[in-house]
Image (cartoon, rainbow, N blue to C red):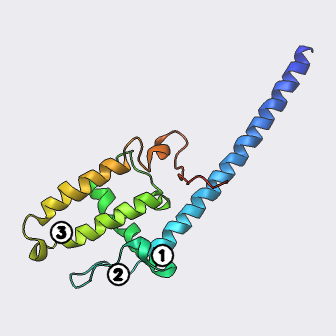
Amino acid sequence: MTSTDDRIATQDVLSERVAHLQNAMHRLGADVIRLQTQLSDLVTAAPEQDGPDTEAAPFIFNLSREAYKSELGSLVAWVNEFLVPVYVGDDSVWCPVWWEHHEAVGRLHALRLAYRELTDTAVSGPSGPGIWHRDHLDPLLDRLRAESGPFASCLSGAGHVERRRAQPA
């Protein structure tokens, strides 16, 4: 091959690579739109914030499909508006699409149920909030952000990765 042939071959490879990257970028853009829509739908479906008279909901995995969606919307609002800003902050060890991890949803819902109970000092006494931090919040954050936790794959350069169970053969 001559140098002209080499340049044409290199340009073809570069053009192919650019086209591949553009397609990947479009797919990522579509994923971002899908996730934004999903998050908006969840937050919109959320019932009013917990009031002092609100009784504790059943565990999220024991709810019907519609009740699950509503409770998940409420959980998304609580986690994104309270838990992350106060306790996680700008920490990069947090999946921005955490609601797609079933383990995280279950654990965060349990944390929220404990929060409702233990931060009401009229019910739990003055040590309730301390117990919530020590027995619930700290172990949960350690588990979610552990090397073997549900967010482990999301912290790589690839970004969010939903861990799925192996399909039976």
Question: Looking at the image, which is closer to me, 125 or 17?
Answer: 125
Q: Residue at x 30, y 60 (%)?
A: 83
Lower position in the chain sequence, tag 1 or tag 2 = 2
Farthest residue, direction front: 169
How crowded pointer 1 is (Cα within 10 Å; few <14, some 14-19, many 20+) is rated as: some
Residue 97, visible in the rendered structure: yes
**Which residue is found at the position 74% from the left and 42% from the top?**
20
Is 49 left or right of 38, judged from the image as shown? left
47 in relation to 12, above or below: below
Image position of 168 (left or right of 112): right
Q: Residue at x 36, y 73 (%)?
A: 59
Q: Quadrant of residue 46?
A: bottom left
Contact, CB < 8 Å: mark 1 with mark 2? no
Distance (Cα) linking label 3 and label 2: 20 Å
Residue 69 image label: 1
| Element carrying mark 3 | helix
Q: Which quadrant of the figure has residue 80?
A: bottom left
Q: Can residue 88 be seen? A: no
Q: Nearer the viewer, mark 3 or mark 2?
A: 3
Q: Which residue position holds label 2? A: 48
Q: Find the residue positioned furthest to the left.
A: 126
Q: CA distance from mark 1 to mark 3?
A: 25 Å
- At label 2, the amino acid type is Glu
Dividing the image into 4 quarters, which one contains the N terminus?
top right
Q: Return the disc, 1 or 3, that comes first in the chain's sequence.
A: 1
Residue sitting nearer the eye, 23 or 158: 158
Amino acid type of the residue that numbered disc 3 sits on in the rendered structure: Leu
Q: Quadrant of residue 72?
A: bottom left
Q: Give the secondary structure at mark 2.
A: loop
**Mark 3 — residue?**
118
Indicate the secondary structure of the residue bearing disc 1.
Answer: helix
Task: Give the side of residue 6 with respect to residue 62, left or right.
Answer: right
